[in-house]
Image: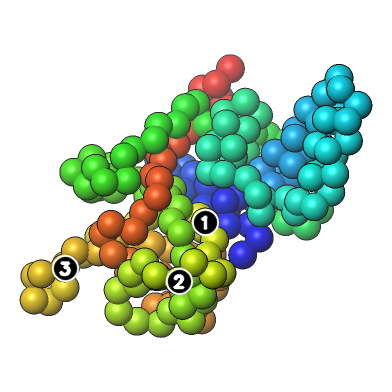
Amino acid sequence: MAICVSTAICAAVSAQYSIRTGESHIFSRESIASGVFRERAFKALMVRDEAERYDELLNMGKMKPDCDISIEDGLRYVTRFGIPFEERWPLGTNRPEGDLQAYKVADYSQIGAKDRVTIKHMLRHFPLICDMIVGPAFDNYSTGIYKKELTRRGKIRHAMVLVGWGVTEDGQTEYWILMNSWGDNWGQQGFAYVDINSLSSVFYPIIIPPELAR
């Protein structure tokens, strides 16, 4: 669960890259998780006030890379530095291997989570990145349509890839189809159907291959 933001961004960018180029590559989750974390640490060190700097670094010590970053944190980072292939910077390694060829995310846009028309239009072209608030029941989701939980305990903001939508057989209920990062044994072979009003935010990245970015 700790790398949901990086996984969602890389999965969406990988899909867009494959559709645009016809080639299949997985992009590096570690580059985002480590990069955003290190950038925050550097900014904390630059704080002039000693007490504030101490508090910032103390908070950094309690963080785990990617756990406490938002989708926008990750997208903002990759628009500046790009994303290398996973084979160049594997998950769990501190540094990239060999020459680092990064693919630029030229820009990104946020789509209103309630703007179903725009979201559906964009999904006809590429998967999107989204997040939502999930509760304990989401861990054990296996079938049906997941709806917001009333409990306040154990809730987290979780990032996933938005890949499509559907309607129940009776035509009464619309739902989004999300690809999770918890493996094929979770949910419906790694996917979840969630209530149409469940999403918190939705983003769309636009990539530029290195040869076009020069």
Q: CA distance from mark 3 to mark 2?
A: 23 Å
Q: CA distance from mark 2 to mark 1?
A: 14 Å
Mark 2 or mark 3, which is nearer the start of the sequence?
A: 2
Q: Secondary structure at mark 3?
A: loop
Asked if 173 appears above or below 111 in the picture, the reply is below
Query: Residue at label 3?
Result: 173
The residue sitting at 40% across, 70% down in the picture is: 149
Residue 157 numbered tag: 1
How many neighbours does mark 1 have within 10 angstroms: few (below 14), some (14-19), or many (20 or more)? some
Q: Mark 3 and 2 residues: CB-CB less than 8 Å, in contact?
A: no
Three-letter code for the amino acid on which mark 3 is drawn: Thr
Pointer 2 residue: 151
Q: Secondary structure at mark 2?
A: loop
Is 106 located above or below residue 85 in the figure?
above
Dot 1 falls on a residue whose secondary structure is strand
Q: Amino acid at mark 1?
A: Arg
Instruction: Judge from the rendering whether residue 175 lies leftward or rightward of residue 202; answer left or right.
Output: left
